[in-house]
Image (cartoon, grey):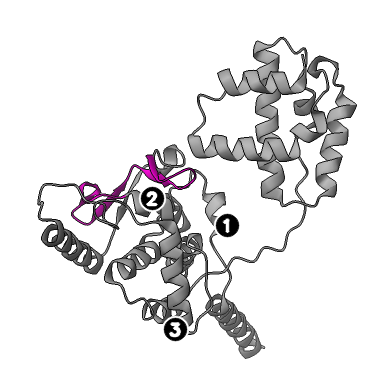
Amino acid sequence: MLFENAYKKYLELGTSHLKKQTLETFWKNFNLHVMPYFKGFDIFELTKLDYLKWKNTIISMNYSNSFNNNLYVCFNQFIQFCCDYLDLSCNYLKEIGNFKRKYELKKYDYYTLDEFNLFISGVDDYMYKLFFTFLFFTGARPGEAMALKFSDLIGNYIYINHNLTTKGGRELDTPKNISSYREIVIDDYLVNELCNLKEYYINLYGDECFDYYIFGGIKPLAPTTINRVKLKACSKANIRTITLHQFRHSHATLLVNEGIPINDVSKRLGHSKISTTLDIYVHCNLEQEKRVLSTLNSLRLNILEKI
């Protein structure tokens, strides 16, 4: 059986468990980085050496650890499907194993509280100002925030149970994973502002019973418009721009710097593992360095005084 025909079978029968956005990413990466290498080959005649050569080719491209891992996982799922349902005798890709992680100097940008206050001063529209404020003070993913309706706001809690996909149109989808289903406590000031926004929608549209999107009203905000407003605000406030997802980074770093236990921060972000929070969202900034320096100086001083 030709490799591409086996892949068609997999798309027809083996991807029902994948979310739409995940499937689109899978399809794109597979067609760019796997199919060109194996197209035209009989999948039953591929050897372990063939898979190893492919792996070395990908390594030579110097992609990120994250990209390599995602590509391997997708490819491995396909080969395992062929073993389980198309009578492929052995999953050689699994025997070879995943890509070895390489050292990466990661640069995650984020806003401090002062920087955020400077940024938000440049946002003129009230609804967008609340949207960015919500991201910064909750750590919600942008898609999660865009999917929220007022029925998800109960007292001081926001219930995350949807995500808004942006590929192929805006559609409500399930959150990223099981751990992403969560409730987030929000401060009184933000609750009051959101309630004022709801009153604005009621006065604008004249329907008290409609379950409005918190950010958008009748329909959710468009990502392209959000980014346009963000860039305009950065220019007005004369501050560097960060991505929407980096507002989530900012929130995590803010809480850790304020002494919130990493386990609580991890649950708030909807991570299944604390290591994910530590690896990605917690950054060493100048204030942390100052505290380290102060501690070391105090220890040195105590030693000198005892001599």
- Please say whether residue 260 is visible from this viewpoint: no
Q: In this view, does 277 lie above or below 11?
A: below
- The residue sitting at 58% across, 70% down in the picture is 284
Q: Which mark is residue 280?
A: 1
Considering every residue shown, the one lying at the far top of the view is 87
Q: In terms of sequence position, does the residue under pointer 3 or pointer 2 come before the other? A: 2
The CA span between labels 1 and 2 is 19 Å
Amino acid tagged 3: Ala
* Image disc number at residue 144: 2
Callout 2: SS: helix
Q: Mark 1 or mark 3, which is nearer the start of the sequence? A: 3
Query: Counting other residues with Cα less than 10 Å from the Cα at mark 3, is it few (<14), some (14-19), or many (20 or more)?
Result: some
Q: Check whether the beta carbons of the residues at disc 3 and disc 2 lie within 8 A of each other.
A: no
**Callout in the foreground (3, 1):** 3
Number of the front mark, 3 or 2: 3
Relative vertical location of residue 144 with respect to residue 243 in this rendering, above or below: above
Image coords of residue 121 (percent x, y): 36, 81
Vertical placement of residue 224 versus 63, above or below? below
**Element assignment for label 3:** helix
Q: Relative to 56, is 218 on the left or the right? A: left
The answer to whether residue 150 is above or below residue 84 is below
Residue labelled with disc 3: 237
Label 3, label 2: how many angstroms apart (C-alpha)? 27 Å
**Residue 91 horizontal side relative to residue 189, left or right:** right
Q: What kind of residue is marked 2? A: Glu
Look at the image and say whether residue 49 sits in the magenta stretch: no
Label 1 sits on a secondary structure element that is: helix
Segment colored magenta: 148-172
Q: Do the residues labelled 3 and 1 touch (CB within 8 Å)?
A: no
